[in-house]
Amino acid sequence: MQGQPMIILGEDAQRMKDKSAQEHNIAAARAVAESVRSTLGPKGMDKMLVNSMGDITITNDGVTILNEMDIDNPTAEMIVEVAETQEDEAGDGTTTAVAIAGELLKNAEDLLEQDIHPSTAIKGFTMASEEARSQVQDISIEVDRDDEDVLRKVAETSMTGKGAEQHKDVLGELIVEAVQAVSVEAEDGSVVADLAFLDIETQTGQAASESELLRGSIVDKGPAHEDMPTDFEEASVLLYDSPIELEEAEADTQVSVSDPEQLQEFIQQEEAELEEMVDRIEATGADVVLCQKGIDDMAQHFLAKRGILAVRRTKKSDLEFLTEVLGARLVSDLDAVSEDDLGRGSFRYDDESESFYVEGTREEAHGVTLLLRGSTDHVVDELERGVQDALDVVGDTVAEGLVLPGGGAPEVEVADRLRDYADSVSGREQLAIEAFADALELVPRVLAENAGLDAIDTLVDLRAAHEDGDERAGLDVFSGDVLDTFDAGVIESAHAKRQALASAAEAANLVLKIDDIISAGDISTEGGEEPGPGGPGGAPGGGMGGMGGMGGMGGAM
């Protein structure tokens, strides 16, 4: 080559190596983490997100914020995956997981500047993560799965600071009742909250305090015919997934008639076939027919004459849920229907919402619906997000039976124990473990900042309390006092905390392990416009390479 460099990348390709790549990745990850930090805690602020269609979302749910943001950077999207994983596995703690991941990378940057190799930092973070989860398990408090008071406090803690907070007393009781209603005993004797049989429906126009739990389901359809009965205290119910109509010929046909009587005979023949179908439905003993497909107008007339309620175009998901609620089977052939295929339940029609409230009356009926009410669509949407998180953590608590005091208490306690653990580790990994401990204390610091308190004074007071042996000492963000948060009713799921620590550490390690970024074009996931100058943290190479085309995260919120 006579000393000439070999060019192996296309002219549009971009490449970052070594320190530049690490700084770029850390800056991108920290930008994502910092975008949701202000939402943490009971006094966290909300974000208004406006998409390209002009639709507005107002929330402080971490995973919702990150999913709605126009993120166009591969490293930033890796951090978003942390929130998604946390949401899938634990239901709550998404903001905590992302914030800790960002703080770990900030501390890792300091380690890299001290010439500590990324592999050493990764090994130290892995050791610290394993020890931290072990310590969380050690300080967890075992509770009775049937202790409704503790379960309600877990639900209320999860909802505090979200749209559901104002009515958390009412909603907390409904959530506990709902989770217990769908909790079943597994084959190994453990208890599992089967949330697949818990449906959430929303209605606008009423206060959230008027939300209710139905031991059944809601079918947002009206009767197929106005003369049909709508209310039954106990009805036999047929769930039918075929049309109550005459089959159409596969080929187009034309019939010529020369006499009006012949036309009348065709009509009478069709009516006779439809009436025969209705006769077969009546013979099953069904009082109510919920049909997934259409119902012919004449069939509706015959059903109404026989006092049978029929609902057409019922969603398949509703029918499948009703099989559990009513103890019924979904049938396709009327000739094969037996009494065992029918379900039993009560029906109540609500004219205002134009929906049927269906409740099962059989002992084997399994399935409940949480009906959430709110004044506007934005209110009920945020209410649903907060309640869904609370359902998940209460379900985890019922299954595991382990909880933690909230208010930053577990983070400060585990950080203290990690520092003791670091003293027993030789080598530079010790510094990484201490950096991990420092990152955990971000949670009480941010809780204090978001509540308008002095973060340093708060952290000093918390550390002093834990050094005196008070493992449950946490921050009361309303009074600013350090107290036993478990006794104060601030209780969190131990499973969610362990998952947050694992997700944050793994995400940070994944980012640290990258030392070379090679892109076929702009370093973004969409290949949009050229990267703007600068970026969060002064990332070299054009900031974050897109991030919504706003030159970083500065204008994202």
Image: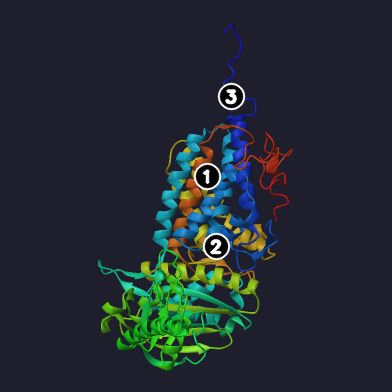
Q: Residue furthest front?
A: 258
Residue at the disc numbered 1:
508
Viewport quadrant of the C terminus: bottom right
Q: Is residue 485 visible?
A: no
Q: Tag 3, which secondary structure?
A: loop
Q: How would you rate the neighbour count of disc 1 (Cα within 10 Å): few for under 14, some for 14-19, many for 20 or more?
A: many
SS class, disc 1:
helix
- Tell me where residue 216 appears, x and y as whole percent: 42, 81
3D distance between C-alphas at marks 3 and 2: 49 Å
Earlier-in-chain disc, 1 versus 3: 3
Residue tagged 3: 9
Marks 2 and 3: in contact by CB < 8 Å? no
Q: Position of residue 197 (x, y in %)?
A: 40, 73
Q: Nearer the viewer, residue 11 or 289?
A: 289
Residue 24 against residue 295 in the figure, above or below: above
Q: Which residue is mark 2?
A: 408
Q: Between marks 1 and 3, how big is the CA–CA gap?
A: 29 Å
The amino acid marked with disc number 2 is Gly
Rate crowding at label 2 as few (under 14), some (14 to 19) or many (20 or more) other CA atoms within 10 Å: many
Residue 363 sits above or below residue 84 on the image: below
Q: Who is closer to the viewer here, 49 or 340? A: 340
Horizontal side of residue 255 vs 454, given as left or right: left
The alpha-carbon separation of the residues under discs 2 and 1 comes to 21 Å
**Residue at horizontal 62 percent and vertical 50 percent from the top:** 32
The residue lying toward the viewer, choosing from 360 and 424, is 360
Q: Secondary structure at mark 2?
A: loop
Query: Residue 502: in sight, yes or no?
Result: yes
**Vertical comparison of 186 with 244: above or below:** above
The residue mark sitting in front, 2 or 1, is 1
Q: Nearer the viewer, mark 1 or mark 3?
A: 3
